[in-house]
């Protein structure tokens, strides 16, 4: 377990941010936290999702390539998010282990 925790220390040194205990979520102040942004995101998603069939004339074969590209992007994004979650989980275990040793 110590080898894993030291590996997390090594990876954490590459993190582009520092952990912040002083973070506060303030509606309308924190980026992308306003109700207007949420509504615009939902409307934009629906317009793109349902509007693409009217904007892009396609045959079934052409859509399969676009669908494969979209699925590949989603798989890559999922792998990145999973890796980030595991990284943070290991970091939290490391912090908890240090607190227990005090």
Image (cartoon, grey):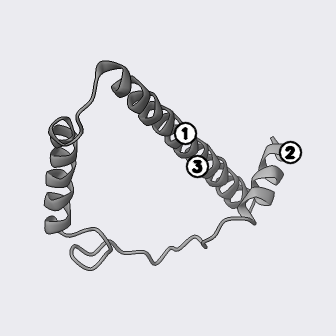
Residue at 15% across, 48% down:
47
Cα separation between marks 3 and 2? 19 Å
Cα separation between marks 1 and 2? 27 Å
Within 10 Å of disc 2 (Cα), the crowding (few <14, some 14-19, many 20+) is few
The residue tagged 1 is 76
The residue tagged 2 is 3
The residue tagged 3 is 84
* Residue 90 x %, y %: 66, 47
Q: Earlier in the sequence, mark 1 or mark 3?
A: 1
Q: Are marks 3 and 2 in contact (CB under 8 Å)?
A: no
Q: Which residue is most to the top? A: 60
Within 10 Å of disc 1 (Cα), the crowding (few <14, some 14-19, many 20+) is few
* Residue 41 x %, y %: 21, 57
Reply above or below: 37 against 60. below
- Please state which of residues 80 and 26 is positioned toward the viewer in this rendering: 80
Reply above or below: 4 against 59. below
Residue at 57% across, 45% down:
80
Describe residue 60's horizontal placement relative to residue 99 as left or right: left
Q: Quadrant of the N terminus?
A: top right
Q: Secondary structure at mark 2?
A: helix
Q: Secondary structure at mark 3?
A: helix
Reply above or below: 47 against 60. below
């Amino acid at each position: 377990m110590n080898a894993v925790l030291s590996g997390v220390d090594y990876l954490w040194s590459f993190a582009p941010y520092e952990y912040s205990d002083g973070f506060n979520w303030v509606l309308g102040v924190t980026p992308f936290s306003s109700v207007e942004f949420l509504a615009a995101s939902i409307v934009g998603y629906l317009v793109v999702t349902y509007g693409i069939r009217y904007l892009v004339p396609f045959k079934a074969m052409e859509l399969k390539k676009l669908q494969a590209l979209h699925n590949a992007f989603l798989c890559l994004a999922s792998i990145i998010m999973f890796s980030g979650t595991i990284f943070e989980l290991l970091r939290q275990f490391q912090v908890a282990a240090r607190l227990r040793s005090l």
